[in-house]
């Protein structure tokens, strides 16, 4: 009888030929007398093939591990337990300062700000100085050789997030130091600093990671000796004006300055006007303080920032004494 196809596939070739010639079945060897499914033998793999495969697998694992490490360094995962994670953004500033005022006068330009930084709604830091001097020309006293204060520097005052203001000051100071190290005598003017800050704040706004500051930039041009006064806000909007203010001062102080401003104001008149505006802001702005600073840049290149001092205030006005039934004035 013919063999089944299953047995035919498992029989040796010699047994098949003998069956075809004689018609008799030749028994397979004893090693193959098992279930047909167990008669299939695994192919032999040489030791060299195994070693080559292990080498290639090891090289692939090394490549994958290096790629994973480089990817982790470039794109770190969010760390929910670390407030300094690189993927976080400032959505709501916490430590903030309020108004900064600026005005041009006959001899230069002047800024004013208080020294309060509020932690949320709490008046916490009362010596936060929010006006800084950037750059300027270095010089020495001809008689003694002692270094003199830089001339034709740039005044930068900021309202908003105080840590972002510190970051901006560090950035501008590094740029000014680089220019000084070049030794070509050029300094970045106030107008150039204002234009540079406009580009920086607009770029950060486009990255959805803005610097939460409204900045006032003031100074004197070394060539034309003309005063400069400009504003940049946190989304890169910039403009120049004879009188400027940030924060709540743009609503309360600007009308006062427009009413009393003259292009030929003397230095004392400009200072008195700024102090009156800061006094009104102390009365009306709950984030303001009666401790303030004055900074000025004069046409001869002098750039000074005063020490903090307190302005006189009075709550004896009848409007402050008589409150309405709802608790307001």
Image (cartoon, rainbow, N blue to C red):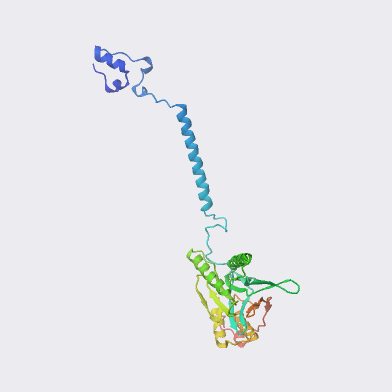
Q: Quadrant of residue 290?
A: bottom right
Q: Quadrant of the N terminus?
A: top left
Using the image as rendered, state which of residue 51 and residue 192 is in the foreground: 192
Q: Is residue 103 left or right of residue 40?
A: right
Residue 239 x %, y %: 51, 76
Q: Is residue 281 above or below residue 89?
A: below
Picture residue at 32% right of the left edge, 21% below the top:
10
State the image coordinates of residue 175 (x, y, percent, origin top left).
59, 66
- Residue 36 appearing in the image: yes
Image height of 312 relative to 213, above or below: below
Q: State the residue lying farthest toward the right.
A: 144
Q: Nearer the viewer, residue 316 or 74?
A: 74
Residue 284 appears in the picture as rendered: no
Q: Is residue 12 left or right of residue 122?
A: left
Question: Could you say where residue 188 lies in the image, as x and y percent from the top left?
Answer: 58, 71
Look at the image and tell me in which quarter the C terminus lies: bottom right
Would you say 190 lies left or right of 150 here?
Answer: left
Q: Position of residue 109 (x, y in %)?
A: 60, 80
Q: Eyeballing the image, is 153 above or below 276?
A: above
Across the whole image, how many numbered discs are drawn on residues?
0
Q: Residue 280 occupies which quadrant of the picture?
A: bottom right
Q: Which quarter of the picture shows residue 167? A: bottom right
- Using the image, determine if residue 217 lies above or below residue 73: below
Could you say which is closer to the camera, residue 36 or residue 8? 8
């Amino acid at each position: 009888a013919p063999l089944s196809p299953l047995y035919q596939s498992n029989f040796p070739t010699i047994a098949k030929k003998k069956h075809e010639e004689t018609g008799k079945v030749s028994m397979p060897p004893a090693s193959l007398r098992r279930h047909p499914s167990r008669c299939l033998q695994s192919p032999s793999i040489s030791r060299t093939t195994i070693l080559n495969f292990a080498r290639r697998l090891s090289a692939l694992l090394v490549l994958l591990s290096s790629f994973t490490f480089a990817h982790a360094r470039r794109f770190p995962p969010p760390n929910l337990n670390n407030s300094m994670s690189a993927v976080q953004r400032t959505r709501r500033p916490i430590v903030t300062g309020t108004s900064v005022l600026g005005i041009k006068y006959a001899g230069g330009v002047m800024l004013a700000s208080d020294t309060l930084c509020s932690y949320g709604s709490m008046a916490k830091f009362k010596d936060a100085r929010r006006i800084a001097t950037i750059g300027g020309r270095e010089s020495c006293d001809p008689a003694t050789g002692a270094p003199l204060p830089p001339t034709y520097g740039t005044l930068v005052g900021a309202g908003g997030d105080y840590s972002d203001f510190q970051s901006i000051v560090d950035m501008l100071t590094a740029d000014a130091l680089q220019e000084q190290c070049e030794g070509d005598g050029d300094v970045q003017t106030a107008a150039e600093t204002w234009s540079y800050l406009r580009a920086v704040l607009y770029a950060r706004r486009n990255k959805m990671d803005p610097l939460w500051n409204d900045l006032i930039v003031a100074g004197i041009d070394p060539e034309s000796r003309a005063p400069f006064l400009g504003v940049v806000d946190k989304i890169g909007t910039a403009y120049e004006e004879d009188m400027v203010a940030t924060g709540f001062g743009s609503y309360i102080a600007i009308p006062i300055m427009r009413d009393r401003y003259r292009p030929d104001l003397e230095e004392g008149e400009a200072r008195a006007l700024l102090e009156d505006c800061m006094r009104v802001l102390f009365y009306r702005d709950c984030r303001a303080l009666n401790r303030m600073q004055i900074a000025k840049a004069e046409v001869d290149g002098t750039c000074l920032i005063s020490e903090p001092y307190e302005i006189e205030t009075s709550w004896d006005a009848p409007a402050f004494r008589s409150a309405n039934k709802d608790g307001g004035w």
